[in-house]
Amino acid sequence: MIATIVIAGIITVAAIAAAVKRVRDFRNHRYCAGCSRCAGGMNADGNRGSCHK
Amino acid sequence: MPKHTEEKEITVGFIGNPNCGKTTLFNAFTGANLKVANWPGVTVERVEGSTTYKGRTIKLIDLPGIYSLASYSIEEKVSRKCIMQENIDVVVNVVDASSLERNLYLTLQLLEMGKPVILALNMMDIVEERGMEIDLHRLPEMLGGIPVVPVSARKRTGLDVLLHAVLHHYEEGVKDRVVHYEPELEAAISRTEENLKKYYGELVHSRWYAIKLLEQDEEIIQYYPKAAVAADINYEKQIIHQKYNYIDEIVEDTLFNKESKAQATDKVDKYLTHPVWGVPIFLGIMALVFFLTFTVGDFLKGYFEIALDWFSGAVSGLLIKLAVADWLQSLLVDGIIAGVGGILTFLPNIFILFLALAFLEDSGYMARVAYVMDGIMGMLGLSGKAFLPMVLGFGCTVPAVMATRALEKEKDRKRTILITPFMSCSARLPIYVLFADMFFGKYAMLAAYSLYLAGVLAAIGIALVINHFDRGKTEGTLLIELPEYKSPNARTIAIYVWEKVKDYLTKAGTTIFIASIILWFLLNFNLQGMTEHVADSFGAEIGKILEPVLRPAGLGMWQIGVALISGISAKEVVVSSFSVLFGIGNINSAAGMTELTGILESVGFTALNAYALMIFCLLYTPCAATIATIKKETHSWKWTLGMVLFQLVFAWLAAVLVYQIGGLFL
């Protein structure tokens, strides 16, 4: 019974944390903004996202 | 610091192509004085700083990296506005000496503006390392007598000489006319200059304005509409062409021992960017990428399967030992481990895909794809620029949709956003790997590759139809830098691949974890509480609503309906749903696949049904993160929901066509 409660609690906390992280990541993540300085995300070396991570 | 009030502060504008070392040079001068400021009204940053030389304060302005002074992008507009209107005394044009041909186009445009220009030949150390030589007497001669100063921002050499040149030449303009166009064009320039004088009086940079008017530059036309009437023919192509002819002359006369690497790049480009062979070569390279993804990826995934089997067994044993409730055992083993673990076993395939894409990007090939596709995109009413977001879409649709910001015209942008989700992102790869392996045996790779092609063809087809009904002016000339080919850098590739692998693991630990829990709940509960019969669950009820709709596409099973709905959270969830729905612990293992194939075949699910399912997954509604990004980028729920609905209907039609037409032959 105790093990069930503890594991269920861990899963619940993990699920909430996962949901919060996903939403926060999406809001905060700075994808390449395609500012055209590097032709739509590719710089002179052919790499992309050199200015944004 | 002594202030010399009797002498005016000199303002220097630093300008150059992106990645020419301009900011390194700027930082070498300014050091800790650096400050960042925004231009009013625009989002592009400019950086200001100052330095002193021989008691004179020199204010330095670092402008955005640009390739030309056209008015296509915000950076170009900002830079030229700054040079024309701001109180800039002298322009320091920073040039990557190892890529003279590319950099001199901007130089010639700057010289036409008539402001004092000093050419800072940066990266001279690299030129020397490569065994090349630049004739530093002939080069200034050919550029109208402007000072040419070799510098190395990296090694901090030539910096004082550059400031010395600034001090001595800030009041000198270009001595001679640099580019002499062909007589017809020169006559048109003279005519336009006369018109400018007639309607607007004496202008300081009249030749530059005349050239811009002949290029039909929208911004300059707004300022001088009367003079623009005379310049009714667009001479832009001739002007660009004749400028490049002159650049060829300069390079011929001043650059010696052009290195073998650059010559090798030219040779390779003859084939890779060939107007006819360029596209088939691109398709061949992508086929090789998927071949590696399947063969090497499948070899590696065996180890992941063993680990997952062991982990699943160990957890199960532990839960029994701890006497944990049955429902919780089911949630952990059949829900979370089957769902999340199942997705993790595809990590080797994802790893190989991104390793191959990183190799292509770092070698310099990816930048050529846009160039190669420019012609085809032109036929679709889009520029080659629009293909760059589409290429990014092979990785993830979210940054691909964001990269459409590089397109200036709103209409082109929306069209590209509409078709980009059809490019098969890495999240769809597990679906292809699973179903192609299960139903296509040795032709699995071919089946998966055909889906990537189907995605590209769907995108092109839709763009073609839109262009047929809504013809309009598209983006201007494609101006893209084609870097030299180089051996990919191990560190760059490692960082790139790690970022992607981290994203995948994060997605497995967040979105797929939550989706697995929700799915497990939907499949194990109904209104009466927990049920042992999955066919009575909430999930089954939802799936049964979709069953008749999906039947014409050969997908008339309620489980498929549930998996497809779940897939909207993230496309990989389609696979983890199959794990949870059919209670298969390790779906990607040989045993798991055999079990699932057996279950599906027993209800008449064949290779044709599997192909229709993969087509549907390729084309239907993108994942939640993409939908949110599209809303963010288009600022319209109407447009976003319209697009989602369109893709849903299009996917259904395509799957029905594949299943029904395929059924006639099989």
Image (cartoon, helix red, strand yellow):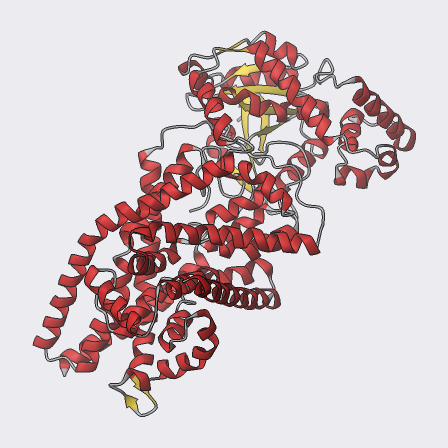
At x 47% / y 55%, what residue is drawn?
B398
Provide residue B68's location: percent of width, then percent of height. Answer: 63, 31
At x 86% / y 30%, what residue is drawn?
B196
Q: Quadrant of the image for the C terminus of chain B?
A: bottom left
Q: In this view, does B36 lie above or below A26?
A: above
Which of the two residues, B265 or B78, is positioned nearer the viewer here? B265
Q: In this view, does B273 lie above or below B323?
A: above
Q: Name the side, left or right, on which B96 lies relative to B190.
A: left
At x 57% / y 25%, what residue is drawn?
B103
Q: Which residue is farthest left?
A: B321
Q: Is residue B513 visible?
A: no
Q: Is residue B211 above or below residue B472?
A: above
Q: Is residue B213 visible?
A: yes
Q: Which residue is farthest bottom?
A: B528
Which of the two residues, B371 or B259, is positioned nearer the viewer here? B371
Q: Which residue is farthest right?
A: B198
At x 35% / y 54%, what residue is drawn?
B503
Quarter assignment of residue B440: bottom left
The image shows a total of numbered marks equal to: 0
Provide residue B37's location: percent of width, then percent of height. Answer: 57, 42
Which of the two residues, B142 or B660, is positioned nearer the viewer here? B660
Provide residue B324's location: percent of width, then percent of height. Answer: 14, 79
Q: Which residue is farthest front?
A: B665
Quarter assignment of residue B522: bottom left
Provide residue A21's location: percent of width, then percent of height. Answer: 36, 63
Quarter assignment of residue B564: bottom left
